[in-house]
Image (cartoon, rainbow, N blue to C red):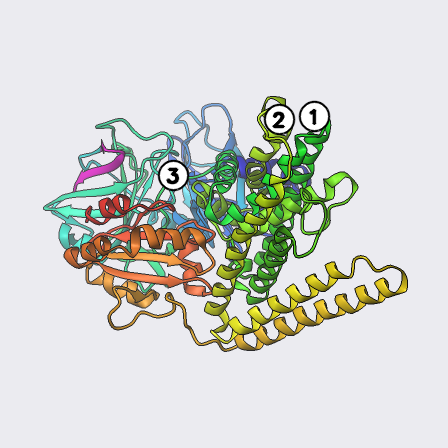
Amino acid sequence: MFIDTIRWLAAAALMSTPLAAAAQSAPERARTEQVEVRLISEFASVAPGQTVYLGLEQKIIPHWHTYWKNPGDSGTSTSIKWTLPKGVAASDIIWPAPSRFDIGPVTNYGYSDQVVLLTKLAVPASQAIGSVIPVEAKASWLVCEESCIPQDATLRITLAVAATASANSEHKRIIDAALERIPPAVGWPAAYQRQDGKLQARLTLPARVGGKSASEFVGRHTLRFYPAEWGTAAHNAAQSFRLDGQQLTIGLVPGETPPAQGGQVRGVLVAEEKTAPGGKSAIVHAVELGAGAAAPGPGPGPGPGPHKTVARAPAPSGDGITLWRALLLAFAGGIVLNLMPCVFPVLSIKALGLLKYSELSSAQKRMQGFAYTAGVLASFSLLALALIVIKNLGAQVGWGFQFQSPYFVLGVAYLIFVVGLSLSGVFALGGPANLGAGLARRGGHTGSFFTGVLATIVATPCTAPFMGAALGFALAQPSLVLWLVFMALGLGLALPYMLISAWPALHRMLPKPGLWMERLKQALSFPMYGAAVWLVWVLAQQAGVNAVPLALGGMIMLALIAWIFDSTRATSGAARLAANGVLLAATLATVGLSFQAVGLLAASPAPTGQTAQGGAGQDWEAYSPPRLAALREQGKPVFINLTAAWCITCLVNEKVALSQPAFKELLHKEGITYLKGDWTNQDADISALLKQYGRSGVPLYLFYPSGAGSEAVVLPQILTHDIVGSALRSK
């Protein structure tokens, strides 16, 4: 809720004055760009001792929503502050059943289109006939789409007091319809049970619910439970419903303040008509649990009501996430990223730099660390900016999205190959400790800066633990929040190197420079060549096998150019200038022609990678939403692996856990269907599934146990055979 509080405060300073003026000009109603509000009464005149309903009517423009009493992961519920004559009393807001709104990993509860929030007004029996009751309501609400705007209005009506009440037919019709949307309080026995980190709400249904038997009612409808208090359960987590006789068990994921064992179940249970995924559904029946006997009025009948909500697939399991938690997870993920196999090649550059830094002063060493950190943060800022721009254009993007471009993959392959040539001694980009992509100048600070840039580039195809939730959260937030999360990730990546540079005690542990450094430098070129080979393999998955000779041919040309460059270093004057011009032109021509050829191949590549298609003799099928829906409808267990050829984390998990004979035997023994989704190239269906479970990139591993209504278990991003086996046997 921290994020919406910041947005609330920022917008309040800008927008409160115009709305206040609007309220003064029209006492019974007010209007903003997003919401039209008015205060209505079912009676134009009231009698002494009478209780009447007042309604705060909100008409909300499409795609925007206001909030229920439990707003969910973010937001603020609507509030009303009453100013009434002495003796006249107003009740709390009587809340209609809410709808669910999902924005990435954030789930909110509230209302769209139109809603009437009811309040009971009690007129004292001593109220004099012929008098008037001035009613003033200061309403405050938060209205949100992708951004949120706090709004308020002061509304006024006057009720005449007469011997006999007189109804306002228009307003009474609106309020009667609103009463049909109020879930009646029921006394069904219901309590919470907690066991092994799981939360269940168990309640006993009556023999008939909504005009149907309990089993028919549960089987024919899509059920949702909305906890009355924030923090009871994770709002964005999928819910499961199991009926045994008349006992309904609701499976929940505990929230930040889960209820105690045996605690009272408080909230609203909603039954919606079943629709196709993505379709609209109407509330068929809703009841309020744990509210005692204080029902506000008649409840909904067995027929469909006017209240609409969007039917969605289950949301990601796991706790709701705040900005501070996202920053902490991103920072931790950045630290762990240093240990991932995809970052290893750049460690050679960092290690060589540390060797030379042992001769520098403490201040110079700290400056090297700061320059490296600046390179990392600048690169993450650029990456965040690219994500913001692409996301605002309406595309679905995620972590490592740039590796879905064959141009980027080929460019990085060439860059890493050239750095490897320099480490091997084919040519010198700079001093032996300043290999920041050949830009080492002015005391090595520029070299350290571009070493940080290179570290960021080679880190992006990996997803470390903690990163998935943080990045999924960031991509669903405003631009500033996304940038902050990426800065936290960059600080984590830079932290170990920055500490070594700034900690004098560690300096004394570094080895002394010597001739052996040249041999180590040459040996460390081979991981760079290995990374280049891997990227050429990734390119083959995107553009086909014909891209391989093109990429390798370009590397041969770059090696020749580098050798000629180093061989002609001794020349000077016009000859040297001309040679450099020719070599630069040759380099640009090589890279340009390679890019053009690869682009033509990528326009219609034939899938050749192992993740392209499932086929005969394989233990997996290609992922598709219709196939998953069919398997779940049949109640079959399903394991999903979302992967990419450029994701080293994915490839390591495949090797360690998912391609072992024991894993295949387990699939066969347990009757589990294995679906694999390949995100090497952009795929809208895979992007949608990643977004549904709050992830910004691969890998993502899901296991749906047997049963048509089962919720997915999200496996860790780093797999072992034991982790996978334990999850798959839990069906």
Range of magenta residues: 193-204
Give the amino acid type for the residue marked by disc 3 in the picture: Asp
Please rate how many residues cluster around mark 3, counting C-alpha atoms within 10 Å: few if below 14, some from 14 to 19, many from 20: some
Residue 507 image label: 2
For the point 46% across and 44% down, the residue is 340
Mark 3 near mark 1, Cβ–Cβ under 8 Å? no
Judged by depth in the image, the label closer to the viewer, 3 or 2, is 2
Q: Earlier in the sequence, mark 3 or mark 1?
A: 3
Q: Within the magenta stretch, is there residue 198?
A: yes
**Between 102 and 727, the one nearer to me in the picture:** 727
Residue 319 image label: 3
Query: What secondary structure predominates along the stretch shown in magenta?
Result: strand
**Between 683 and 539, the one nearer to me in the picture:** 539
Q: Earlier in the sequence, mark 2 or mark 1?
A: 1
Residue matched to label 1: 362
Q: Within the magenta stretch, is there residue 195?
A: yes
Which quarter of the figure has residue 222?
A: bottom left
